[in-house]
Amino acid sequence: METLLFYSLIGGLFSLLGGVLLLAIGTKIRQTITTSLLSFAAGAFIATSFTDLLPEAIDQSGKAHPVLLAAMGGLVLFFVLERLLMRYGFKNDKHEHADHTESLPALLILGDTLHNFLDGIVIAVAYVANPALGLTTTLAVAAHELPQEIGDFSVLLDHGWSRGKVTLVNILQSLATIPGALLGYAVGTALTPHLPSFLGAAGGIFLYLGASDLIPELHHRAGHNHVLRVVIPLLAGIAAVTLLVH
């Protein structure tokens, strides 16, 4: 059990390295490249959905249709949640473009916490099958989370969060791998049949965050002026996740 908890801790916290490196960049430099960082984040979230979560779910399920239904469910769920947050949680008298992004940090934290929780379950299931496989899975989880964490830090910093608050929140959500691992260990392989649906829903959530929240925000920020400053980082985010997953 101690080994499994250690693995889940590594899987969650090691992924913070990318975000910590981002904090090391000077504030002025970070503000200058904010649009590019958000573009990288959008690419990372979309790639996490299409190259990691959905393929893994389909591989485990053996059928694409139920996984895609779960992905659609996750996407619609977060759309409804965002509308509720915009209506009741972030209500302003004056309608501004910012109204559409105020709820993004809450959605991002919720989605990433769910992802980390599922990662913990995956690590535990692999560990129960074979402790050596559990270690390999842990390293893979930590690696593919790196670009995603850079995206998380970029978005939260852009919304005015302090460096300390961003770091604390990301540490706490990364620790969600531990209860996931404990649940996965407790139920063993009994949870495995349901993992494809959970992973599919998480894939839909990440697709929503990247395509529905971040990309429209990029269009608003860049206007008609920039192409390479937006397109290249987005492709870099996709490439980083894809290379680390495969």
Image (spheres, rainbow, N blue to C red):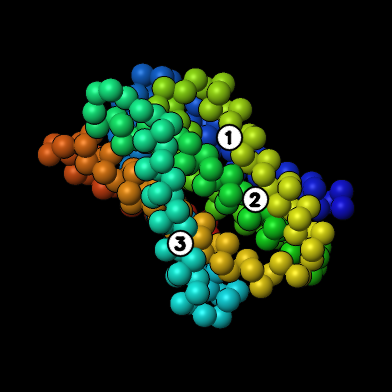
Q: Secondary structure at mark 2?
A: helix
Picture coordinates of residue 204 (x, y %)? 44, 58
Outermost residue, left direction?
224
Crowd around label 3: few <14 · some 14–19 · many ≥20 (10 Å): some
- Given residues 220 and 154, the one toward you in this image is 220
What amino acid is at disc 1? Asn
Q: Is residue 152 left or right of residue 238?
A: right
Q: Nearer the viewer, mark 3 or mark 1?
A: 3
Q: Nearer the viewer, residue 188 or 90?
A: 90
Left or right: 226 with respect to 217?
left
Q: Say if residue 234 shows up in the picture.
A: no
Q: List x then y, in percent, for residue 15.
A: 60, 43
State the SS at label 1: helix
**How far apart are the two marked residues, 2 and 1, measured between alpha carbons?**
13 Å
Residue 14 vs 45, above or below: the answer is above
User: Is residue 194 placed above or below 225 in the rendered structure?
Assistant: below
Q: Which residue is mark 1?
A: 170
Q: Residue at x 58, y 49 (%)?
A: 114
Q: Find residue 36 and name its label.
A: none
Residue 100 is situated, as x and y percent measured from the top left of the image, at 31, 36
Q: Label for residue 73? A: 3
Question: CA separation, marks 2 and 3?
Answer: 18 Å
Task: Tell me which amino acid carries mark 2.
Answer: Phe
Q: What residue is rendered at 45% in x and 69% in y? A: 69
Tag 2 residue: 117
